Amino acid sequence: MSRLGTLEELPLRYREELLQENLAPLWPSMRTVLPHNHPARKTRPTFWSYKAIRPLLLEAGRLTPIEKAERRVLVLANPGLGSENLTATPSIYIGMQLILPGETAPNHYHTPSAVRFVIEGEGAYTLVDGEKCPMGRGDLILTPSGKWHQHGHDGKDPVIWMDALDLPLIYHLEASYAVEGRAQADSDLPDSSQTLFRRAGLLPYRSLGRQKKPYPLMRFPWQEVRSALADLARATAADEAVRLAYVNPETGEECLPVMGFSALMLRPGEERRLTRRSASAVVHVVEGGGEATVDAVDARWEEHDTFAIPTHAEIRLRNLSNTQPAYLFIVDDAPMQRKLGFYEEFPAR
Ligand code: 1HN
């Protein structure tokens, strides 16, 4: 392969003329923007311990009233991407949000899509476009781009959840903004996970003929996911992963345009190498404890810990319990990569 010319090889006068005309030569930067065979990555495999986050988040509850925060969040900022850039992977933002009893987080919508994954506490809820979604432990709640959402808390203890947004992507596209609104009317109706979409393979009859709504289901209760994983495990060969995808029940497609969601059960004692993929991801531990190796980084994980996976990373996971399954919730950017036509998987050879 030939060596490409550098900037320094060009006459100073020529470089200055280019600059004057807002021009740049490609060849000195060619390998930077288009390396051979493997992408350049700044994202570091990073592990965040919930034991470290929790007291700091509760302290934020004492230091900063909700009125001064709008959303009281500590962001999981990947050091490889610049901590000031508030991003866990190139496309995925992750934050831990605290709401205290009696507090409300005001109504707004924005261009990035968001989801909540509930970590601890009872009695909080999110109103999404008029639908009241109770926030139970492990529940996944969607707030797609452009949907009004506000949070409230009628319970007694602090409630903490994880937010995942495609904010870094939308911000980079210079398309990120929010609109504030008046509070939504409170609703007494159960959300549609409790009424319209109760079982796989069963839809409200009217779903058949009608123009499909892009987001028919906003809440995915953890108890359903957990028991579905247990049932799937009984029908899954030992060398295969027990993993479920969260999808739109009317179309079978991924729930949101950029971020994809899945739940992985590691059987007692299971050690698993995940298929290497072009997508970046964030893994959150719902239950259990174990070890992980992400590229060259080894770490231990416990309940509610979270870790960032760069694109194209090698991933090895191990459940350290020989009696209990471990449950992991995974956010990735595979839906976006599929749409853009470059999603890849690299099965072990
Ligand atoms: C947002 O709207 C929420 O609604 C949480 O709870 C985190 C981070 C960046 C931008 C908007 C929320 C957010 C956010």
Image (cartoon, rainbow, N blue to C red):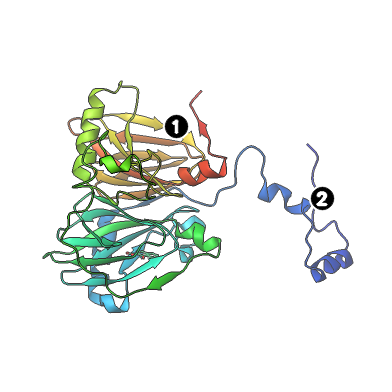
Is disc 1 placed on a helix, strand or loop? loop
Q: How many marks?
A: 2
Question: Between 236 and 217, which is closer to the camera in this rendering?
Answer: 217
Q: Is residue 276 visible?
A: yes
Does residue 137 appear left or right of residue 28 in this picture?
left
User: Residue 184, how many percent across, how many down?
Assistant: 26, 69
The quadrant of the rendering that contains the N terminus is top right
Residue at position x 17%, y 64% in the image: 158
Give coordinates of residue 340: x percent, y percent: 56, 44
Residue at left offset 45%, top offset 49%: 257
Q: Quadrant of residue 120?
A: bottom left
Mark 1 Cβ inside 8 Å of ligand 1: no
Q: Amino acid at mark 2?
A: Gly
Asked if one can make out residue 325 in the rendered structure from this viewpoint, the answer is no
Observer-nearest of 268 and 239: 239
Considering only vertical position in the picture, is 320 above or below 216? Answer: above
Q: Nearer the viewer, residue 64 or 70?
A: 70
Q: For the residue carrying disc 2, how many other residues have a C-alpha within 10 Å: few (<14), some (14-19), or many (20+)?
A: some
- Residue identified by numbered label 2: 5
Tell me the residue at 31%/44% (across/down): 329
Q: Is residue 335 shown left or right of residue 50?
A: right
Amino acid bearing label 1? Thr
Quadrant field for ligand 1: bottom left
What number is the disc on residue 146? none
x, y percent for residue 274: 41, 33
Circle 1 Cα neighbour tier, 10 Å, few/some/many (<14 / 14–19 / ≥20):
some
Q: Which residue is mark 1?
A: 275
